Amino acid sequence: MLNDKATKPQSLKSVVSRVSAMLLLGALSPLIILNITISVVLLRAPLKKGNWLDIGGGVVALYTWRCGFLKNSAMLINIVSGEVNFVGTPIIWAQTTIPRIRRFKSPCERAGLFDCLQLHRMTGLVAGDTATLLKKQNEQGAIKDCAMMLQIMVCRMLYKNGGATSTDAAVFGIPFDNTNMSDAVNWVCGTHADKNYCQIGYFLNANSINLAAGQTSLRKVLSQSNKNFVDGSGMRLAARHAGIDLADNLNGTDMLPALCKKAIETGSALFLLGSKEGIAEKAGKALQARFEGLDIRGTHHGYFKSDDEIIERINNSGATILLVALGSPRQEEWLARNRHRLDCRCALAVGGLLDFYSGAIPRAPLWMRELGLEWVWRLMQEPKAKFNRYVIGNPIFLFRVYVLKQSIRGL
Ligand code: UDP
């Protein structure tokens, strides 16, 4: 019975794939004829077959045109002959990460030219483990498959392939750690035994770069943290133009679930500071309900007058990790000013995170985050509060990216 349920949509998917590939081949027939003609003129075989592996270890033999244009379009032949699907088990192209699972068993029927891991790698989104993501991909219908392929093509144009090439990097003169989520979380929950003051981490995004461009003091603050992580499609675009392929997209909101798990594992305790009255407490309770055993030592709203009182409260709580959600640039400036007085091991400036986890503001749907369009959602949620930041700030940021690109090219 179970098998029936699992195979039915699969076969339908395969049929849809094959019929669409056939139609596409028909539409591309003038180009195909041209490619074949060029090969014949050059006395070469028109098709070339290359062997690849999928992440389950299966061999995937794919055609490409030997001569001519859109050489990869020959892979449509593989789809028509039922060897691969449009969407399926990821093929290990140059940038694909191989899951750390021995003999990974993919839930997909066969290998696919497109897969959700490609999309997540390009946007740096960390939204689940390989098996869960592929299971979800396998269950989605043909329309969602098409939308996903479209997303991948758009992201390919915007962000290239993704995948880190260097760990220490800088954009707009501000250094950052080009790292993945698990290394970042390990750092936050680390003992930092060799350090005698609180380690500070910030998340750089288009807004913080815009703010820092107008305030030398903020630029100094951002440059003097222990680690900066990069967040958002704007930063990905800027990094791409600076010749840097980014690893994971890192922001406090995506990091928190992994951070909570690691905190439980390492016996770390959290203090949540920020947002309106009652929000931090609500977020704390929601997190403790979701992550059993999570130690939250205290919470406080972010509209306080005296730093001394708050710092005393944080230090007395015995928390080892402090999350500061006071909005930019207040949170970064507050941490830079007070870090030497904080007893916790690590503190992060996390923006609107508590609003999301308390349920006060809903998070953007996954498809928007996958396209790097979370900012559109936030603008829709709070149009007045976010107008300057996004409607004015985004074009200014894009102009900065343009100037950065020109300056790198020496123009
Ligand atoms: N906030 C605060 N104290 C302040 C100003 C802001 O606690 O003096 C809170 C505000 O309630 C919100 C968060 O800081 O929860 C800022 O959220 P925002 O969405 O602006 O942060 P972002 O992630 O965009 O930097």
Image (cartoon, grey):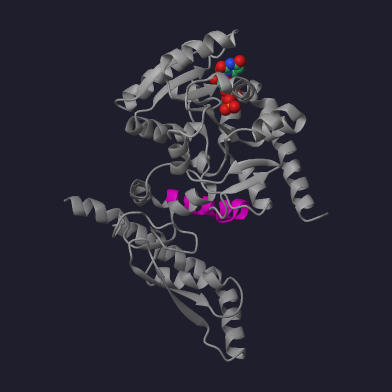
- The single residue placed furthest to the left in the displayed view is 1
SS majority, magenta: helix
Q: Is residue 163 above or below residue 73?
A: above
Task: State whether residue 99 is above or below residue 292.
Answer: below
**Quarter of the rendered image showing ligand 1:** top right
Question: Is residue 184 or residue 141 the one in the foreground?
Answer: 184
Q: Position of residue 141 (x, y in %)?
A: 38, 49
* Farthest residue, direction right: 411
Percent x, y of residue 88: 38, 58
Instruction: Say whether residue 373 is visible.
Output: yes
Is residue 279 shown to the viewer in this render?
no
**Looking at the picture, how far across and down is residue 355, in whole percent?**
50, 21
Q: Quadrant of residue 81?
A: bottom left
353 displayed left or right of 41: left
Closer to the camera in the image, 57 or 197: 197
The residue shown at (38%, 47%) is: 133
Magenta residues span: 143-163
